[in-house]
Amino acid sequence: MFTFASVKPRAAFFVVILVVFVLLLLRSARVVPAGHVGVLDLFGNVRPEALPSGLHFVNPLARVHRMSVQTHEVKETMDTPSSEGLIVHLDVSILYHLDPAKATDVYRTIGRDYETVLVKPNVRSAVREVTSSYQAKALYSPEREKMSSEINQHIIAAVEPRGMVIERMLLRDVALPLRLQQAIQEKLSAEQEAARMQFVLLKEKQEAERKKIEAEGISSFQKIVAEGINDNLLKWKGIEATKELALSHNSKVVIIGSGKEGLPVILGGDTNPPAGQPAPIPHR
């Protein structure tokens, strides 16, 4: 029969050592999940390098704090004044993630709740600072993109040196008092109509210039043609026409002697009378 008393003390010692070793091995094995890094803290002493995702064996007495390096979204809804003192309602979203290389610094200087301590306050501060330098109508004009870019740059300048990486800033919604919205829309519509009329006037002016140039071209052409037609040309054309008539096979009567400068007069004759008319009776 087996009893503990029958086990040799030396063998029992090795069994105890083996059990303790297994327990320590299990205790020292730490798994850092994907999308996280591990910050090793041993009695307040933080290891300079963060542990990447995967299986690690560390001091059993140390604590491994998991910190996410995945993309997070911060949503802020706030009422902030514009440059003219109007209260503007804004919905803002920030996409960011923790810089893995600075995870240990963030843990030491800010802690694990860096979103509440660092990110959100700086988002609110940047939105208020930038919005206060723009008029309310900028939120309904192309300047909105410029304002969003400035807010993004302010946030980057405030949080990236502390270990946060800003991916994108989204200005999701803007709300003004209804009467002010209508006034801004009417003003923007009037400005667009004025710009359209300027375009129409410019187009009409260009068309008038085109017609003027066209008229000048026609006038120049007529002047050149008029200068090219003289008496000698007309006489030559008359001679050509007379020659063609004289060479035709139709019977004709040629009258010569219409003056020194005149051309022969050719009267065409037709031996066959027109249909429906009696032939002339010759005189005896």
Image: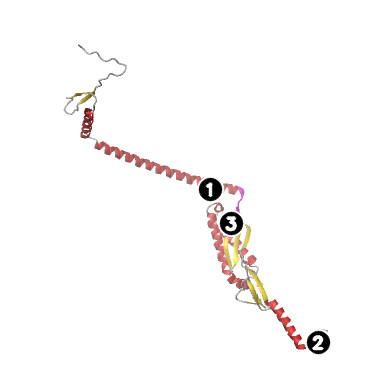
Q: CA distance from mark 2 to mark 3?
A: 78 Å
Q: Range of the magenta residues?
A: 169-178
Residue 274, picture quadrant: top left
Q: Magenta span has 105?
A: no
Q: Is residue 165 visible?
A: yes
Q: Amino acid at mark 1?
A: Leu
Mark number displayed over residue 11? none
Mark number displayed over residue 171? 3
Q: Nearer the viewer, residue 166 or 198?
A: 166
Mark number displayed over residue 188? 1
SS category of the residue bearing label 1:
helix
In the rendered image, residue 3, in percent from the top left (x then y), is placed at 82, 84
The mark that comes first in sequence, 3 or 1, is 3
Which of label 2 and label 3 is nearer to you?
Answer: 2
Residue 213, picture quadrant: top left
The secondary structure that most of the magenta stretch takes on is strand
As drawn, the residue found furthest toward the right would be: 1
Dot 3 crowding, Cα within 10 Å, few <14, some 14–19, many 20+:
many
SS category of the residue bearing label 3:
strand
Q: CA distance from mark 3 to mark 1?
A: 21 Å
50 up-or-down from 91: above or below: below
In the rendered image, residue 263, in percent from the top left (x then y), is placed at 19, 28
Residues at marks 3 and 1 touching, judged by CB atoms closer than 8 Å = no
114 up-or-down from 180: above or below: below
Mark number displayed over residue 6? 2
- Residue found 55% across the figure and 58% down from its top: 148
Q: CA distance from mark 1 to mark 2?
A: 99 Å
Q: Amino acid at mark 3?
A: Leu
Which of label 1 and label 2 is nearer to you?
Answer: 2
Residues at marks 2 and 3 touching, judged by CB atoms closer than 8 Å = no
